[in-house]
Image (cartoon, grey):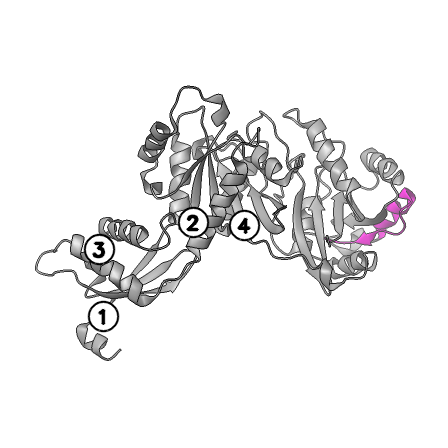
Amino acid sequence: MTIPVVTIVGRPNVGKSSLLNCLAKRRISIVEPTSGVTRDRVSAEIQYKDYVFELIDTGGMGIKDVDGLTKEIEAQIEIAILTADLILFVVDVRDGVTPLDSMVTEKLRRLKKKIILVANKVDTPKFETQAADFNTLGFGEPTLISALERFGRSELLDKIISLLPAPCPESVSSEPIMKLAIVGKRNAGKSTLINTLAREKRVIVSEVPGTTRDSVDVRFEVEGKQFLAIDTAGVRKKRQVKDSIEFYSMARAERSVRRADVVLFLIDATLKVSEVDKKLGDYIISEYKPCIIVINKWDLVQGVETEKFNDYIYKCLPGLSFAPISFISAKNNEHVVETLSLAMELYEQANTRVATSELNQALEEALALHRPTRKKAKSPKIYYTTQVGASPPTFVLFVNDPKLFDSDYERYLSNQLRGKLPFPEVPLKFHFRARTKASLSSV
């Protein structure tokens, strides 16, 4: 059973995104005084008392987008309104009733939907009396809130659940089996891939670079299994970040990588691997995330063998030499399902645990092939290792002196263990811990 949908609507700059963040108790939508920041449907699952519902933030109604995406934004708003079980119509108490508020009112009156009028930005008691002006809109007395101060949050949530169907056990949404972050530089095809996975126009697709600004969570189902895909803003060179909107978009892209179980790293097959791609690859490595290098728009490439392209990619991204490569066309839905299956394989590898005996056998074989280089008068020694975590597989290596082991030898061990143990395509994490022979005998 699907959970109820509550959609936030209103003219630009009334605080819709702030309201989503307030009710979710975490920063999801970008909040900026600039009109038109929100373009896609940005959603969050809200759990309050015994209720669970999906809360959707939308773009400002009546906005004229500077990049010519007005029709696309309006289409996303229309979908959010039509699929809503309840609508939160947000107005700005400090501005009073504006012509755009009246325009939104006329649109909502034609719908047979439950509507709560929300007067936002009631930051001080002096604004409470001004809220009475909105009674003329015909949606009853407005519910007062300050999204930034979280004043009125509980009262609004109580009102929301009073208008939703009574909860039942089946209405509690199941946790997604896997979170997929879809990252890449601008115009690599991330939003197109999201829409292909969701089998609907869930996010705006445009040739305009930087169309996606927020990180947009999209649930989708394949063979009865729930997945969560995270569409992110396209990464660009830091010196080209023009404003705070792009700054927060980049921060959210990095947060999406941290949240993910598996990262789909999209690279445009028609362009050379750039410095932006390399920096993004380095960030994925630094977070120890399982990663598929997804070569998108492969349908536009002619006369290039995949093996040669593989060699080119690994030469440009040597730190991801263990990551599998998948060639797709998100637009034509070519090899997308196979890529999802591969992501599941990486997810399982990352959550694999091996027996200590099997792990140490693999370590002994690696040491027999190549021991760490002696430094000055002291020889580096590894006594044994044990796995202490998964996702990523994490190991503690007990050694005589951690300072004697450099990143080159750590990389060697990673490659050896990946080749001998059941996680050949995911990053491994090591902690070197000092332990003497005497202390080992007492273990």
For disc 2, the marked residue is: 289
Residue 227's x, y, as percent? Answer: 58, 49
In the figure, 199 relative to 376: above or below? above
Q: Are marks 3 and 1 in contact (CB under 8 Å)?
A: no
Say which amino acid is labelled 3: Ala
User: Was residue 358 drawn as part of the magenta stretch in this picture?
Assistant: no
Label 3 and label 1: CA atoms lie apart by: 20 Å
Q: Nearer the viewer, residue 94 or 302?
A: 302
Upstream in sequence: badge 2 or badge 4: 4
Q: Position of residue 352 (x, y in %)?
A: 41, 58
Report the Cα–Cα distance between label 4 and label 3.
33 Å
Give the x, y percent position of residue 384.
Answer: 24, 66
Number of the front mark, 4 or 3:
3
Label 1 residue SS: loop
Q: Is residue 443 above or below residue 368?
A: below
Residue type beneath disc 4: Lys
